[in-house]
Amino acid sequence: MRDYLLTLCVTAAVTYLLTGPVRKFAIATGAMPQIRARDVHREPTPRLGGIAMFFGLCAGLLVADHLQNLNSVFELSNEPRALLSGAALIWIIGVLDDKFEIDALIKLGGQMIAAGVMVIQGLTILWIPVPGVGTVSLTQWQGTLLTVALVVITINAVNFVDGLDGLAAGMVCIAAAAFFLYSYRIWFRYGIEAAAPASLFTVILMGMCLGFLPHNMHPARIFMGDSGSMLIGLVLAAAAISVTGQVDPDALKIFEGSTRQATHAALPVFIPLLLPLTIIAIPVADLVLAIVRRTWNGQSPFAADRGHLHHRLLEIGHSHSRAVLIMYFWSALIAFGVVAYSVHSASMWSVLLIVALSAVGLVLLLLPRFTPRAPRWAEAFVPPRYRRRTTLPGPAVPAYESEAAEAAEASQESLEEPEERTPVPAGVNGATAIGPRSRFPDRRKAGTRG
């Protein structure tokens, strides 16, 4: 576990330290597109954050290769090299898209080629466990098609959900943490070395996301872009393929006894068939709904719009940060709930806890629809949004209206008599390209006059 923590810390540190220089590079090269109709942010923000994430991936693999307890992953398996090859290809395609906005079909073809590169080097699904039947070996073409499909679905699901500051990185980090717990348990409880690559991939993925999140939280100073979203989607898919299609269920010795007992005992192995999709259930649901919505409206499935789940949360009335936290909550509930159920499937407490937390999530989701109103005697002690919006008779004016009128008068006066201050030219999100946020030479308090 110490080696895993060291790998995670190195990956996060490299990603974090490189994101600042990458941001300056993105501004210098013009990788900062104009605001689009579907965008939520208000100022042009540089992309290419995937560059720092890719070098974090390389650093994590390099450190793990020199650690005694993790070096066996590279000696006994070719999967880390397969992951690095596919990640490099998808990363190059993402960088080109962040800079030149390449066609969606070209990106789809690149995703399939990256998946094919991993398949050629051995990272593919070899067999799947089927309840009541046992282990079913797949032919080369079946394994290839299933692997490519899983990679493409996961990449696009993560890419679709990348619409709010810190949303994609946080959700993938939660998914990677849940996946690590599952694969680590398979490795150490059953002694199956084939689950070790998946544990390593998920730890590195967590480091990539944690190192990038401080720069990407609202208000974001840089976006990961397609170079980052497609990269972390591919790494997550690679971990799912490794633990699902490379671990032989017969090695767990679970297909013994009666059919019912064998099926119940095999639940931790059957769940990985859907675990990659349940762990990213929110992005996958968003992907499916977007395809259905766009096709129903006569648009291309790859056409962008403002109908994603995070956009709907903003329309309901949630703030940017609260919408992101709600998506985090549901992702963690589904991901860790599935993993907990795979471990203690016979316990009803886990099911009851998941149901209770789901009810809490629904209340938080619909909270803006039920904004409480304070009684009249308590309106002076609560924020304006909780007061009754009624006009009092006579000359009396509610406090919130008088405050609004005073603010409007102050703003009008400031427009009529502008102060002579020369601000430093600011760049993205109020910051210059190479330094801190803009500063005024006059440090007087707002509203004072010379």
Image (tube, rainbow, N blue to C red):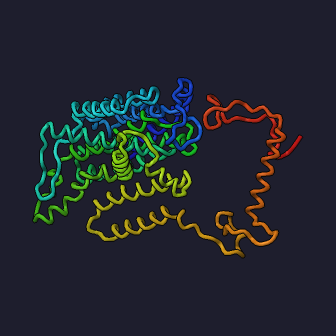
Q: Quadrant of the C terminus?
A: top right
Residue 75 in sight: no
* Residue drawn at x 40%, y 59% as measured from the top left: 333
Q: How many marks?
A: 0
Find residue 28 and report its horizontal and vertical position in percent: 56, 24
Instruction: Answer with left or right where residue 254 lies relative to residue 315.
Output: left
347 or 368: nearer the eye? Answer: 368
Instruction: Answer with left or right where residue 80 lies relative to residue 218.
Output: left
Q: Residue at the far front: name it.
A: 298
114 or 347: nearer the eye? Answer: 114
* Up/down of 88 relative to 325, above or below: above
Instruction: Answer with left or right where residue 385 lies relative to residue 339.
Output: right
Q: Quadrant of residue 338?
A: bottom left
Q: Residue at the far top: name it.
A: 29
* Residue drawn at x 75%, y 71% as measured from the top left: 392
Find residue 360 and report its horizontal and vertical position in percent: 46, 66
Q: Residue at the far right: name it.
A: 450
* Residue drawn at x 44%, y 52% as measured from the top left: 309
424 or 317: nearer the eye? Answer: 317
* Up/down of 76 relative to 315, above or below: above
Residue 302 in sight: yes
299 or 389: nearer the eye? Answer: 299
Find residue 136 and report its horizontal and vertical position in percent: 12, 48
Find residue 436 and report its horizontal and vertical position in percent: 66, 34
